[in-house]
Image (tube, rainbow, N blue to C red):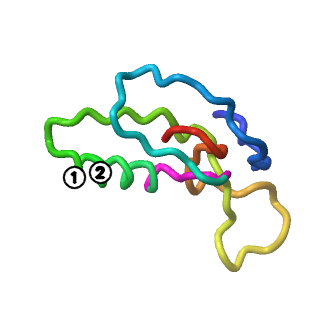
């Protein structure tokens, strides 16, 4: 069993960095957000479809923070809910 993360806030701006890869095209975040694994996966698919099948796509962001949610129509109390989605915290200026 693992400890459930707290939501937290996404604040601040990322410091300018050089990319580790020889990137020609990149997705850069314009605002702070929490991106779920579905969003990251679909962004990767869109980039692959636009660049062609021979392109290599590297995702820098990894969704490792689990957000919990209690089922609907459940009474208050009895602890936190189960993990419903995994997200990645993205700050303004981060490369996705």
SS for dot 1: helix
**Above or below for 22 versus 9:** above
Q: Are marks 2 and 1 in contact (CB under 8 Å)?
A: yes
* Residues drawn in magenta: 32-38
**Residue 38: x %, y % from top left:** 44, 55
Which residue is denoted by mark 1 in the rendering? 49
Question: How many neighbours does mark 2 have within 10 angstroms: few (below 14), some (14-19), or many (20 or more)?
Answer: few
Q: Does residue 40 appear left or right of residue 52 in this picture?
A: right
Say whether residue 30 is magenta: no
Which disc number belongs to residue 45?
2
Outermost residue toward the right in this view: 77
Q: Quadrant of residue 69?
A: bottom right
Rounded to the nearest angstrom, the CA distance separating label 2 from label 1 is: 6 Å
**Residue 66: x %, y % from top left:** 62, 46
Residue at 48% over, 32% down:
60
**Residue 28: x %, y % from top left:** 51, 45
Q: Quadrant of residue 12?
A: top right
Residue at 76% over, 55% down:
80
């Amino acid at each position: 069993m693992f400890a459930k993360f707290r939501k937290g806030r996404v604040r601040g701006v990322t410091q300018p960095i050089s990319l580790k890869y020889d990137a020609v095209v990149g997705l850069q975040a314009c605002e702070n957000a929490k991106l779920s694994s579905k969003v990251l996966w679909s962004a990767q698919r869109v980039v692959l479809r636009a660049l062609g099948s021979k392109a290599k796509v590297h995702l820098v962001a990894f969704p490792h923070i689990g957000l919990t949610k209690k089922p609907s129509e459940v009474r208050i109390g009895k602890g936190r809910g189960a993990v419903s989605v995994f997200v990645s915290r993205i700050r303004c200026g981060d490369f996705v």
